[in-house]
Amino acid sequence: MIRIFDTHKIRFQKELTGTCWQFSPCQGEYAGQTYTVATPCCWENHPDFGSYRGEGIYRTTFRAGGNLRLECKGVSHTATVYLDGKEIARHYNAYTMFDTVLANVAHGSHILEIKADNRFSKESALHIPNDYMSYGGISRPVVLEQLADVYIRQVHVTPVLENHKWSAEVSLKVKNISDRPLCCTAVAELASKTVVWENVALSPQEERELTSNICFEQVESWSLENPRLYEVSAVLTMDGKPVDDLIDRFGFRTVAIAGKYILLNGRAVHIKGFCRHEDHPQFGCALPYAALAYDLESIRHLGANSVRTAHYPNDEVFLDLCDELGILVWEENHARGLSLEDMQNPNFEKQAEMVIREMIPAHYNHPSIYIWGILNECASETAYGKECYEKQLALIRELDQTRPHSFASCKFKTDICLGLPDVVSYNIYPKWYHDTPVKAYLDDLYQWVQNETEGSGKPFLVTEIGAGAIYGYRNPYHSKWTEEYQAQALEEQVKTVLDYHDCCGVYIWQFCDVRISEEWFGGRPRTMNNKGIVDEYRRRKLSYDIVKQIFEAYGNYLE
Ligand code: ADA
């Protein structure tokens, strides 16, 4: 599934999914052998490759010609793409899409090869041994499209509310991929309004942004209670004939900061959320639609109103579902716990910034995304770290002026970056990594932020809090790792944060148990992160009902 709605009615689009792929590992005992596999998939989910760390080549054939656009929604974690043996694209990072446009390809059968590489090396500054798994494979769909000489590369809609009246800026980016000047007409239809750009002259290879502001009389807002979505349909015509189109969805909603509150459509939202990895014992990070939907329905069943995409951009289908279900999303670029030394990898800055440059334009229209995060628990206590945080938060602001930004810190009272983000966010683990009473710990930290830092007066979020439990491990004295201990710890943790009137809300770490990389281990039982309130098979632990009861006792807003 590419998206949960059609993005084209005119442009030819084909998802290269299913058992039309041959997989061949490049290293290890099965090097050179060939397996028929169905993509999207991770090779770890093939019986012979559960712990394979190396390169693997996926091969398929297709028949097409003319101007082709090939889009990979996710290849883990480094991709090299070949068409008929010629390299046509390279990409680093499993969690953002990349595409390549090839003009005047001969009509006929073609061989597409995608080499995926999930090895750790100095080349990879973000995918490193860590408390989650860097899988290998084609983890999200590969899409083949046929284009005219001019096409719509992007459509963005920016809703604005003034004096209780909605308007929106619609922006089209259209590109001439031919070597001759062209003239076209663009039409955008959204919420029963139409905008026309006549006689758009494009020189060879030129990309032009077309914008317009539209006022709307009768539209419904997108909200948690009524997640009303609208389609924007953009069409290009040449000599009166439709040649390309692009359809996306958006919602009329605003996010703003007012003092210590995060406002959704003017109301101070109270976040009740989960951090969630894209991880599953049968699918790796390539969760099929039904599995994504199950996780979100569970999150909603638990009375949550938000999910934090720890620690990387998520699958567009997951975000489509959040838009439809009215689940707010904290989406963040890819980084977890990078030390100063890790951040000084010569590839770090360009790789981390590239994730931001790919994440925001691709996910801009999702009304469910209310905040952009960066660099979870990286070196925000250091001067160099602060330079990186500053650059990346500025890049977010450059790409999107409509959403606040933040980062999740674990640096307690040593963080020197709290003056940079719109929202101050902390990951804290009283009752797990230290036995401090939750209220005392939270109060001490919050007062320090208010009295000693430039984070004073800003919204304050607890972006992680939780405890571990091994599914099925119980005992009458509730020792650590029992389900009973986790339930009682979460009860104190979540209630304390939600009752803390200066705090905008909480994200529980985490929704489900996840696999971690052997090379990191960190002493984790089962070589898993066991802080889920469900295990990796989504089997409920005792804490599930406790958390559900607590979340349901609180509303979505801080009145
Ligand atoms: C950190 C980190 C999470 C996870 C968590 C834990 O807060 O952000 O990814 O590792 O600790 O389980 O300790």
Image (cartoon, rainbow, N blue to C red):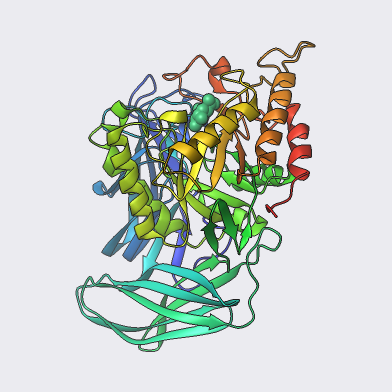
The residue at the far front in this view is 451
Q: Quadrant of residue 434?
A: top right
Camera-nearest residue between 13 and 77 = 77
Camera-nearest residue between 232 and 74 = 232
Query: Is the residue 276 above or below the residue 12 in the image?
Result: above
Query: Is the residue 498 above or below the residue 67 in the image?
Result: above
At horizontal 37% and vertical 36% (from top left) the residue drawn is 416
Q: Quadrant of the C terminus?
A: bottom right
Is residue 98 in view? Answer: no
At horizontal 54% and vertical 44% (from top left) the residue drawn is 460
Position of residue 170 in the picture relative to residue 346 (left or right): right
Q: Residue 284, how many percent across, how many down?
A: 53, 34
Is residue 155 in view? Answer: yes
How many numbered circles are shown?
0
At horizontal 37% and vertical 28% (from top left) the residue drawn is 128
Query: Is the residue 417 above or below the residue 324 in the image?
Result: above
At horizontal 54% and vertical 36% (from top left) the residue drawn is 446
Q: Quadrant of residue 191?
A: bottom right
Q: Quadrant of residue 453?
A: top left
Q: Residue 471, how many percent across, how many down?
A: 69, 21
Q: Residue 65, how many percent across, how many down?
A: 33, 64
Q: Residue 382, how many percent across, how many down?
A: 32, 31
Camera-nearest residue between 413 and 247 = 413
